[in-house]
Image (spheres, rainbow, N blue to C red):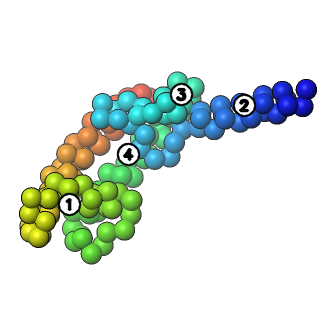
Amino acid sequence: MSGRVMGIVASVAVAIWAALPPGDVALDDDCRPADPVAQFSAVVTGGWFWSRQVTALEEEQGHLLALVGRGPQHLGTRLEERLSRLAEREATASQGDQAEREAAAQRYRTRRMAWLGACLDEARRRAGN
């Protein structure tokens, strides 16, 4: 009997954990919940999930805008590290060319800003803002 109760408690704990809206961006390229946990959270919590996504998207947008005036010597956050890795992947043909890496980073930032804007609009709509 104790094993059954523990199983129920564990199941409830996992369900509560999965339902909590993530604090980081958890959307795919089409601005929908990206993984099963985010999908479950969106279904269970509805507007709360989308409100948390609005906050996460706004924070990432702010970080991305702050990068515009800074050089690669300031890299450090997860977003900045991801930008750096992606830019370097795009510039593999000319790894030694700093200008090409910077151009690749700018192209990524431009695409990411467009995506963030679209997803912010969708998240705000779904959150009721």
Q: Nearer the viewer, mark 2 or mark 1?
A: 1
Asked whether the residues under the numbered discs 2 and 1 touch, taking CB atoms below 8 Å apart as contact, a structural biologist would say no
Q: Earlier in the sequence, mark 2 or mark 1?
A: 2
Q: As drawn, is 22 to the left or to the right of 119?
A: right
Query: In the rendered structure, which amino acid carries the disc numbered 1?
Result: Glu
Q: Nearer the viewer, mark 4 or mark 1?
A: 1
Task: For label 2, count other residues whose C-alpha is less than 10 Å away and answer few (under 14), some (14-19) or many (20+).
Answer: few
Query: In the rendered structure, which amino acid carries the disc numbered 3?
Result: Phe
Q: Earlier in the sequence, mark 3 or mark 4?
A: 3
Q: Position of residue 68 (x, y in %)?
A: 21, 63
In the foreground, 105 or 8: 8
Residue under label 2, please give it: 12
Residue at 53% from the left image edge and 28% from the top image edge: 40
Task: For label 3, count other residues whose C-alpha is less than 10 Å away and answer few (under 14), some (14-19) or many (20+).
Answer: some
Secondary structure under the numbered disc 1 in the rendered image: helix
Residue at 85% from the left image edge and 31% from the top image edge: 3
Secondary structure under the numbered disc 4 in the rendered image: helix
Secondary structure under the numbered disc 2 in the rendered image: helix
Q: Position of residue 91 (x, y in %)?
A: 13, 58
Asked whether the residues under the numbered discs 3 and 1 touch, taking CB atoms below 8 Å apart as contact, a structural biologist would say no
Alpha carbon separation for disc pair 4 and 1: 24 Å
Query: In the rendered structure, which amino acid carries the disc numbered 4?
Result: Leu
Q: Earlier in the sequence, mark 3 or mark 1?
A: 3
Residue 88 circle label:
1
Residue 57 circle label:
4
